[in-house]
Amino acid sequence: MRSIRPQDARIAGVEPLITPADLRAEIPASAAAITTARQAREDIRQVLSGEDDRLVVITGPCSAHDPASALDYAERLAALAADVADHAVVVMRVYVEKPRTRLGWKGLLTDPHLDGSDDVNSGLRLTRGLMTQIAGSGLPVACEFLDPSVPGYLADVVSWGCVGARTVQSQTHRQFASGLPMPIGFKNATSGDVLDAVDAIVAASRPHTFPSVTDDGRVGLVTTTGNPDGHVVLRGGSAGPNYGPIDVAKSLRLLGQAGLEQRLVIDASHGNSNKDHRRQPLVVGDLAGRIGRGEEGVAGVMLESFLVEGNQKLVLGRSEQLAYGQSVTDACVDWSGTVRLVERLAEAVATRRAAFHPQAALVG
Ligand SMILES: O=C[C@H](O)[C@H](O)COP(=O)(O)O
Ligand SMILES: C=C(OP(=O)(O)O)C(=O)O
């Protein structure tokens, strides 16, 4: 019998993984994709700093489980984004890594065949193909970065990144965020604690040195310069929603006390809608009214949206039974609802501009 090394007692197997450099060579980003990613990062930065009075709107499925429906959504969203471009910087959620509360399908990148086979090499190819195509069409891409070795495969085409509620306290995530080239939203913790996100922004804004995987798939000691574009994403939590004016003011105060820009993004889904997609329009309606009346501090809004409303249960290995364009993770608003919500947010910016910056409203 082959002897097992003591450190491998619970390792069932190790397979080769494509390197970031090889994946980029295999699926290169077009010049258009790189330009889209860069331009949108800059637009988002300017909205976050208040130099640009538009709203960032991050919308798309809870998880992109099927490239065809994600591309269908992207094509519709690109047209909507162009319609509202004077008032909103629209970015598509192309979420391929799903953090689970306990267990569940972990996203297209990990399990692209939706059958539990966890063919990560194919997942990376599918994901990069999808993201390069969407960014190449002119629509900026957003995603959550979950596994610390993944950003190297995708970061060149991503305009907005997120560290989620389940990892916001993680030093590992704060460290890699400090070296990413795009603005990073840090969600409040699932408990509702916003200080965790503020701590993460401060930590990620500084340089760090840490072991990591290099572009050619080796290990290396990476030193970052710090990411100055971290910001809070309020997503509600176990204590309830936190999109209301009192919670927002409290969070802005925390940011001010830490010497940070007092502007943030609000996620209309998750704990802010108690994971009930039918509540997202209520959240957006409330925010739009407040933005139109000149409430300060809200720089962006996130929606969970897909082609068909609600969600459906994924049975691993039975993906042929899935309805087209409906979420297999959290419930989403449907496409027509999405159009209404994005337009409502754009109108709120127009109302605010007309009331508080009438000269800009004439130009816009
Ligand atoms: O956004 C998606 C989910 O809320 C997150 O991945 C957690 O999902 P779960 O609680 O169903 O595991
Ligand atoms: C997992 C997500 O969010 P959160 O970290 O807020 O639960 C998400 O946005 O897909």
Image (spheres, grey):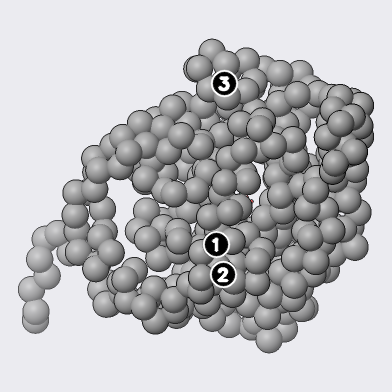
Q: Which residue bears the numbered disc 3? A: 255
| Helix, strand or loop at mark 1 | helix
| Residue 65 is at least partly visible in this image | no
Label 1 close to label 3 by CB (< 8 Å) = no
Q: Is residue 251 above or below residue 233?
A: above
How far apart are the alpha carbons under marks 2 and 1? 5 Å
Label 2 close to label 1 by CB (< 8 Å) = yes
Looking at the rendered structure, the kind of residue marked 1 is Thr
| Residue 234, picture quadrant | top right
Q: Which residue bears the numbered disc 1? A: 35
Q: For the residues carrying marks 3 and 2, which lies nearer the camera in this image?
A: 2
Q: Is residue 119 above or below residue 260?
A: below
Residue 71: image x %, image y %? 68, 75
Q: For the residues carrying marks 1 and 3, which lies nearer the camera in this image?
A: 1
Label 3 close to label 2 by CB (< 8 Å) = no
Residue 300: image x %, image y %? 71, 40
* Mark 1 residue crowding within 10 angstroms, few (<14) / some (14–19) / many (20+): some
Q: Is residue 346 above or below residue 32?
A: above
Residue 319 image label: none
Q: Residue 139 vs residue 177: left or right? A: right
Q: Looking at this view, is 71 or 320 the one in front?
A: 71
Please name the residue shown 48% across and 72% down the image.
29
Residue 167: image x %, image y %? 47, 42
How far apart are the alpha carbons under marks 3 and 2? 35 Å
Q: Which residue bears the numbered disc 2? A: 32
| Helix, strand or loop at mark 2 | helix
| Helix, strand or loop at mark 3 | helix
Looking at the rendered structure, the kind of residue marked 2 is Ala
* Mark 3 residue crowding within 10 angstroms, few (<14) / some (14–19) / many (20+): many
Residue 208: image x %, image y %? 28, 37
* Mark 2 residue crowding within 10 angstroms, few (<14) / some (14–19) / many (20+): some
